Image (spheres, helix red, strand yellow):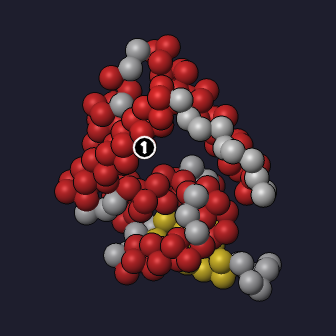
Amino acid sequence: MMGEPRWLSAADQKAWRSYLNGSQLLTAQLDKELRESHGIGLPEYEILVRLSEHEDRTMRMALLAADTTMSRSRLTHSVARMEKRGLLERSAIAEDGRGVNCVMTAAGWELLRNAAPDHVVGVRDHLVDLLDPEEMATLGRIFTKVNDHMRDLDGA
């Protein structure tokens, strides 16, 4: 049996809850803004962003799932919905009978180009411009550590 846990101090508990509430509220607001303005949620927007950053706007589904931190099942459902809207296409990878590529269509690219400026305004309004440059740099360092730690745990 494990010993007594190292309980959070009052200050740690306050910071933890502020992080949880703030990150959930921020994510919900950015998602709401994208849905209202462009008919796409934050997870779908992230799929388009990740594809836009790769050659030919194409990625293996497994890599896309890892990049977006979505389960393969959730990604498959999201991509299927986006395919129905004509934003993405899936195709088998010829060299590898099992792999599947996800490709952004011209309609997906157009949606991303239209949504990105509005999304950046939201990110600035609700996070970046609330912090001074030093705080933003600290936030980046903090979440780089957290991201690296979590990916190491996951073996990613």
Q: Residue visible at 36% across and 43% down?
A: 21
Residue 130: quarter of image: top left
Residue 119, x across and y down, in percent: 32, 43
Residue name at image x 55 percent, y 64 percent: 70
Rendering coords of residue 105 (x, y %): 45, 67
Q: Residue furthest bottom?
A: 97
State which quarter of the image contains the C terminus.
bottom right
Look at the picture and state if 28 lies above or below 14. below
Q: Which residue is mark 1?
A: 20
Residue 40 versus residue 86: which sits nearer the camera? 40
Q: Nearer the viewer, residue 97 or 32?
A: 32
Tally of numbered tags: 1
Is disc 1 surrounded by few (<14), some (14 to 19) or many (20+) residues within 10 Å?
Answer: few
Q: Is residue 143 visible?
A: yes
Q: Amino acid at mark 1?
A: Leu
Q: What quarter of the picture does the N terminus occupy?
A: bottom right
Q: Is residue 64 visible?
A: no
Q: Which of these two is toward me, 22 or 13?
A: 13
Q: Quadrant of the rendered structure where residue 106 is?
A: bottom left
Q: Residue at x 79, y 80 (%)?
A: 96
Q: Nearer the viewer, residue 128 or 81?
A: 128
Q: Secondary structure at mark 1?
A: helix
In the displayed structure image, the side of residue 112 where residue 53 appears, left or right = right
Q: Position of residue 132 (x, y in %)?
A: 40, 15
Name the side, left or right, on which 81 lies relative to 125.
Answer: right
Image x and y of residue 28, in percent: 31, 51
Up/down of 127 relative to 64, above or below: above
